[in-house]
Image (cartoon, rainbow, N blue to C red):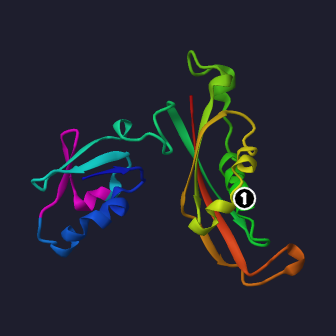
Amino acid sequence: MSLSLISDSIRHLICADLRLLRQSPSRSFSLSFRSKQFSIHQLSQISRSIKVTARGDGAMETTTAEETVSGGVPNNTMKLLFVEMGVGYDQHGQDVTSAAMKACKNAISSNSIPAFRRGSIPGVSFGEMKLQIKLGVPRSLHHQLDLDKVKSIFPYGKIVNVEVVDGGLICSSGVLVEEMGDKNEDCYIVNVAVYVGY
């Protein structure tokens, strides 16, 4: 059995497959990653994408994500320079696209990227800037998301991949304001990570 893990925290993604470990806490567990051992308590500190493979003898092996990630964000189609993160809210009107657009604006609005324009990266021109976008959107709202509108927020950079995953939040705004387009009291919250590279 193998699992492709694309996560900031491995523990959260593999805990479902480690139920037996939780039921038997006295049982020893570790992961090997490029000759380094990790205990179950250190898993939350690992932030690389890896592939975990459970062998028939109960041992687990790992390999780097570059061997396993094909469509997720981020992936190896670009050299990653930095990550911008943001959150967006739609408090009235129940428009998840608006919340996603606000999240993207939030992620990019307090950053400047002079390196691409000034030629600070040898051999890389402004036109080679690439973006990968990962949106955390409540699952029940995925189908309402207009990705073309979300992509329009980015003034430059080639968007090479967009991934929508379960995330964000639907909560109550505490008030229904019909004149603002409310159908109910729901407030939509979307999270985003924008990966910038070339």
Residue 110 is situated, as x and y percent measured from the top left of the image, at: 69, 47
* Amino acid residing under circle 1: Thr
Which residue is painted at 69% across and 50% down in the image? 147
**Few, some or many residues within 10 Å of mark 1 (<14, 14–19, 20+):** many
Horizontally, residue 151 falls left or right of residue 86, namely: right
Residue 10 is situated, as x and y percent measured from the top left of the image, at: 35, 56
Where, quadrant-wise, is the C terminus in this rendering?
A: top right
Quarter of the view holding residue 185: bottom right
Which residue is painted at 37% across and 63% down in the image? 12
Horizontally, residue 117 falls left or right of residue 137, namely: right
Q: Is residue 33 magenta?
A: yes
Whether 95 is drawn above or below 83: the answer is below
Q: Secondary structure at mark 1?
A: helix
The part of the chain drawn in magenta is 28-43
Q: Is residue 71 magenta?
A: no
Horizontally, residue 134 falls left or right of residue 91, namely: left
Tally the numbered discs. 1
Quarter of the view holding residue 42: bottom left
Which residue is denoted by mark 1 in the rendering? 97
The extreme right residue here reads 179
